[in-house]
Image (cartoon, helix red, strand yellow):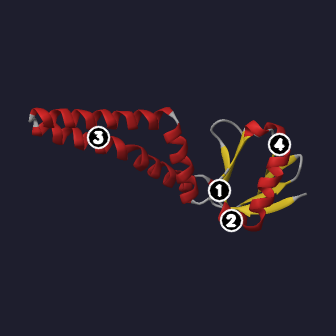
Amino acid sequence: MKLEFDVKVTEKDLYSFNIEQAYKGSQGVISLLFAVLLAAAAVLSAQKGNTGYVVLYIIVGILVLLYVPFSLKGRVKMIMKTNEVFSKPLHFAVDEKHINVSQGDEMAQLPWEQVYRFVANDKRILIFSNRKNAYILSKEQLGDSYEPLKELAGSTLEKYRLKIK
C-alpha cells in the first residue's frame, strides 16, 4: 500500500505540539510544581494574616503558570515567520518500507525501522524521528489518509513504538 498526501504545518499545530512537549518535559513539570508551592505559600500566609504575601504569591504563581504558554506562543510565531519549511506544504509518500518527505528540491527518507515513536490521537499523527523531533500531521489535512496511515504504522512498527488512541 502506498499513501501520498500533502501537509502544511500551521501555527496552531506547531504550538499545540510544543505545549505538549513542554509539559511532558522538565520545564513544564517544574513550573507546575513551583506554582503549586506558591499556592500553598499563599494559603499559609493567608492563615497567618499576611495579606501582602498572599497577593505576592498569587501574582508570582500566575506569572509562572503563564510563562511557558506565552513564551512558546512567541517562539512559534517567530519560527513560522523565519523558517521556510513552514511556509509551504510537505509532500509525503508512505509505503511499507519508508516515509518519504519532500518539499521543492529537498527530500528526506525515514525508514520505518528508524521511527522513534508513532503517536495518533483524535487531532493529529506525530511521527517522531527522535525523542524531540516529529512530523506533525493534522487529521484535518490528512483527510482519507488518516486511517490507512494508522493501519500501516500498526502493521509495520513494533508495539512499543506505537501510541494509538
Q: Are marks 1 and 4 in contact (CB under 8 Å)?
A: no
Q: Please name the residue shown 84% across and 60% down the image.
A: 3
Residue position marked by numbered label 1 in the rendering: 124
Q: Amino acid at mark 2?
A: Gln
| Disc number placed over residue 141 in the picture, else none | 2
Q: Element at badge 2?
A: helix
Q: Earlier in the sequence, mark 3 or mark 4?
A: 3
Label 3 – label 2 distance at C-alpha = 38 Å
Q: Are marks 3 and 2 in contact (CB under 8 Å)?
A: no
Q: Amino acid at mark 1?
A: Arg
Q: Nearer the viewer, residue 54 or 93?
A: 54
Q: Is residue 132 left or right of residue 105?
A: left
Answer whether residue 150 is visible to the viewer in this image: yes
Label 1 – label 3 distance at C-alpha = 32 Å
Q: From the top left corner, tell me how far across and down residue 157 is, in percent.
A: 81, 42
| Disc number placed over residue 112 in the picture, else none | 4
| Disc number placed over residue 158 in the picture, else none | none
Q: Element at badge 1?
A: strand
Q: Element at badge 4?
A: helix
Label 1 – label 4 distance at C-alpha = 19 Å
Q: Earlier in the sequence, mark 3 or mark 2?
A: 3
Q: Are marks 4 and 2 in contact (CB under 8 Å)?
A: no
Residue position marked by numbered label 3 in the rendering: 61
Q: Amino acid at mark 4?
A: Trp
Q: Amino acid at mark 3?
A: Gly
